[in-house]
Image (cartoon, grey):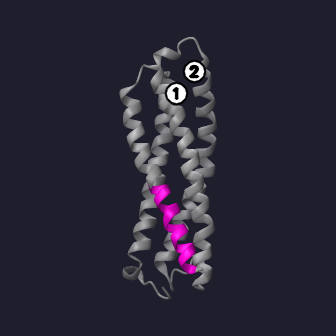
Amino acid sequence: MYSLFLLLHLLCAAIWVGLGVVTLLTDRFRGRSAGTLGELYLMRSTLIYAAIMGNIGGIGILITGPGLAGIEHLRWFAFSGAPWLAIKQLIFVIVLGMTFGLQVPMTKKVRARIAEEMAGAHATHGASDELRSSFAQLVRITHIMQILVLINVILGVLKPMFGAGAM
């Protein structure tokens, strides 16, 4: 059972890290297509794949992480026993807060604005400055979250150096 949970955990982490890579690449393409209808399509596509990859990765980690901790009989937020795990758990709580406190509400507004501008008379001129600014802010939040996810991956890989305890 442990091996299955670990495999699923690693797969979900890879999907979540992959989201960061894809976001970086798509954001470059979007920048190059500024002022065209393609810019709006790339914004919309970014939100679609971010929702899919973010949900698969995040929910998968949310299920398999506690499963792995339970199988190994590790305590929650045990900074004295397994500091690497406690830090990972704390970072995950921060990422969840950023997701539901910042990213989800912002995404809803940006998604609605993209739909308005795609249906508008000036869609062929690309996104408005206001939409570009909001989208850029959303991408920055995503990058910050991805850095936190990478820190968690590094902590998971280097756990013996951080007082791995039972593991």
Q: Amino acid at mark 2?
A: Glu
Q: Quadrant of residue 111?
A: top right
Residue 51 vs 152, above or below: the answer is above
Pointers 2 and 1 in contact (CB under 8 A)?
Answer: yes
Of residue 14 and residue 131, the one placed in the foreground of this image is 14
* Residue under the image location 49 percent in, 23 percent down: 127
Q: Is residue 144 in sight in this rendering?
A: no
Tell me where residue 139 appears, x and y as whole percent.
47, 41
In the picture of the structure, the residue carrying the numbered disc 2 is 117
Tell me where residue 73 appears, x and y as whole percent.
60, 86
* Residue under the image location 55 percent in, 51 percent down: 54
Q: Amino acid at mark 1?
A: Leu
For the image, the number of numbered tags is 2
In the picture of the structure, the residue carrying the numbered disc 1 is 131
| Magenta residues, start to end | 2-17
Q: Residue lying farthest bottom?
A: 166
**Are there few (<14), some (14-19), or many (20+) residues within 10 Å of tag 1?**
some
* Residue under the image location 57 percent in, 27 percent down: 114
Of residue 54 and residue 82, the one placed in the foreground of this image is 54
Tell me where residue 33 appears, x and y as whole percent.
39, 25
